[in-house]
Image: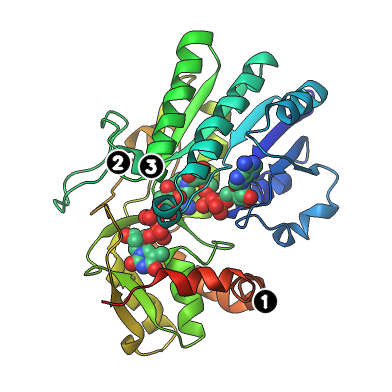
Amino acid sequence: MKRQKVLVTGGAGFIGGNFVQHMVKKYPNYDVYNLDFLTYAGDLTKHSEIEKEDNYFFVKADIANREEIMSLFEKEKFDYVIHFAAESHVDRSITEPEIFIRTNVLGTQVLLDAAKEYAVTKFVHVSTDEVYGELDFDPNTFFTEETPLEPNSPYSASKASSDLLVRAYHETFGLPVNITRCSNNYGPYHFPEKLIPLTISRVLNEQTVPVYGDGKNIRDWLHVLDHCKAIDLVMHDGVNGEVYNVGGHNERTNLEVVKTIISTLEKSEDLIEFVTDRLGHDKRYAIDPTKLEKLGWKPEFNFETGIAQTIQWYLDNKEWWEQIISGEYQNYFDKQYTLK
Ligand code: NAD
Ligand code: TDX
């Protein structure tokens, strides 16, 4: 079999970064291209180990820059495109929606055009369960692949828009695509603006943890390495045109998550600070992963084993998250919280 060329967009970010490392190590016969614009969320220090490998390449480019993307595809003739690059933080989409449309919608369309023009074998679009909107607190209701799209935030609306474009390129042009919609990821290299790494880093620094509203909103937590295995499976075995939900039945309220972290680190719950709720805050997400399980996926982590491993990783890699929160990014943290 000829060497396969895999383009991973957003490979300097959290999930894309873990996926690039998974691919470089697991498939020495694949050339893995990490394409990233290195926004505030992109960081290459995480790849210091794999940088030495012959099958890893980095390209700095903006997915919304048509000329740049087209000439890269012309030159490299990729076999696979695994598309993670996005603006990913819901809170930012509430204050600055425009960049979400540019990156998540226009950027995806440029990549689809390039994938069509240069006839890739597969285009995997990494989306989110947030495109389905929110569920109520009835524990027997789940998002399936048939749940209608009802996004509530500018972020999820931009992701739903890109999902529809991906679907349209399959229906209209026959582009071989899959869409994956996963629940909240956590694990190594999670950017400390998101709930779990923000809580771990702030608790370790004896800072208060802002819990939005009453803390009863529910998220369904998925370890990033289980997500990487799901994408690996879908890129190789997914049926063209199909959507696959990814989630491991690990629902927790935000307050439960924060309390678990605080007790594991043996700190006081006095650090919890209830702050003004997020606008349009989705109540509950929960995934039905049956379709992906039928394809052969099974998660390794449950929330207890995954969160313990993740907390230990943040203890062992303090320099990584400290370099992020000690820079100008700190201003962002300080701006966000309005105490009740
Ligand atoms: P992230 O914010 O950690 O990383 C995003 C990466 O994309 C960064 O490296 C950034 O530099 C890059 N990027 C941004 N704009 C770009 C552009 N114009 N051109 C090229 N690169 C650009 O995000 P993440 O949490 O790793 O999420 C990855 C994907 O998974 C996203 O598409 C997101 O919507 C989806 N997703 C994330 C979660 C989650 O829990 N984190 C859950 C479901 C789905
Ligand atoms: O400081 C906080 N306090 C708080 O109570 C933060 C940052 C969050 N929260 C709450 C809001 C959510 O209910 O915690 C929950 C998780 O928040 P985030 O970590 O911001 O994630 P969420 O909004 O659920 O979105 C994530 O999962 C789906 C990713 O960021 C998205 O990219 C993905 O699509």
Q: Which residue is mark 3?
A: 156
The disc at residue 26 is none
Looking at this view, is 224 or 9 the one in front? Answer: 9
Question: Which amino acid type is marked by label 1?
Answer: Glu
Q: Nearer the viewer, mark 2 or mark 1?
A: 1
- In the rendered view, tell whether residue 88 sits above or below residue 164: below
Q: Which residue is mark 2?
A: 288
Q: Is ligand 1 within 8 Å of the beta carbon of the residue shown at mark 2?
A: no
- Dot 3 alpha-carbon crowd within 10 angstroms: few under 14, some 14 to 19, many 20 or more: many
Q: Which residue is mark 1?
A: 319
Query: How far from the left and from the top, in percent, is residue 172?
Result: 48, 9
Q: Quadrant of the N terminus?
A: top right
Question: Which amino acid type is marked by label 2?
Answer: Asp
Query: How far from the left and from the top, in percent, is residue 317?
Result: 64, 74
Query: How far from the left and from the top, in percent, is residue 48?
Result: 78, 60
Q: Earlier in the sequence, mark 3 or mark 1?
A: 3
Q: Is ligand 1 within 8 Å of the beta carbon of the residue shown at mark 1?
A: no
Q: Quadrant of residue 274?
A: bottom left
Secondary structure state at the residue bearing disc 2 = loop
- In the rendered view, tell whether residue 185 sits above or below residue 242: below
- Dot 1 alpha-carbon crowd within 10 angstroms: few under 14, some 14 to 19, many 20 or more: few
Q: In the figure, is residue 25 to the left or right of 136? A: right
Q: Earlier in the sequence, mark 3 or mark 2?
A: 3
Q: Quadrant of the C terminus?
A: bottom left
Q: In the figure, is residue 112 to the left or right of 300? A: right
